[in-house]
Image (cartoon, rainbow, N blue to C red):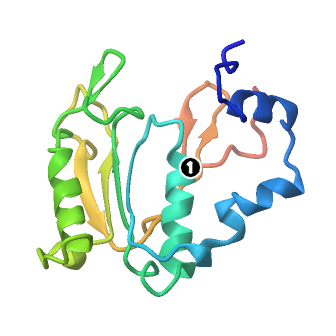
Amino acid sequence: PACSWPGNDLCLIDFFTEHYLYEPMYDSINLSTRWDSVNVPILHIGGWHDIFLQGQTQAFTNIQEYGGSKAAGFQKLIIGPWIHYLMFAEYGELEFPHSSIDPISPFISWMNRWLKIIYNGIEDSPSVKYYLMGDPEQPQGPGDRWIETDSWPPDYEPIHFYINTNGKLNNAPPSENEAPD
């Protein structure tokens, strides 16, 4: 077996295979049950195509609001058009315009600010920077640009869409006389 090397007392694969349902023992490692236990500033970086994005945005939002005195209000979130590996501005065959950022500079600024106590302005920048997705073949369209804000999720106005009987998407609800498609 993959986990049977000398001196290995615990194999995480075996542990999670044996305890695949949520059990009370997970409460001690489940951050969502104790946001206030986090007491450090965190730079959360994720991508729209990242399998961990939901957890990253949830951690940012809840620690920002409910974290300890050194964490609440000191979180930053960056979301780009990346997969989990943020070094590429491509997703499959799609390449998103205006999406490249230097991935090292935010880390260095963050570490200098919070580990070396060098005031470099990062704490004064907006809490959230995200890439607004758009059609990568129309770089002058309404998307494909970076937006900065202080809250997550950003302010928005919901828009409802309906599929008409002709199969077209429309923001007007179907009339009462339209047959279902």
In the rendered image, the quadrant that contains the C terminus is: top right
Q: Camera-side residue: 154 or 4?
A: 4
Q: Is residue 69 visible?
A: yes
Residue at 78% x, 40% y: name it: 177
Circle 1 SS class: helix
Q: How many marks?
A: 1
Residue at the image position 40 percent from the left and 32 percent from the top: 83
The part of the image, by quadrant, that contains residue 62 is bottom right
Image quarter where the N terminus lies is top right
Residue 159 % position (x, y): 53, 55
Say if 42 sits above or below 22 in the image.
below
**Residue shown at 87% from the left, 41% from the top:** 21
Percent across and percent down for residue 123 are: 24, 77
Tell me: 140 left or right of 38: left
Q: Residue under circle 1?
A: 54
**Could you tell whether 148 is left or right of 71 in the image?**
left
In the image as oriented, which residue stretches furthest toward the front? 7
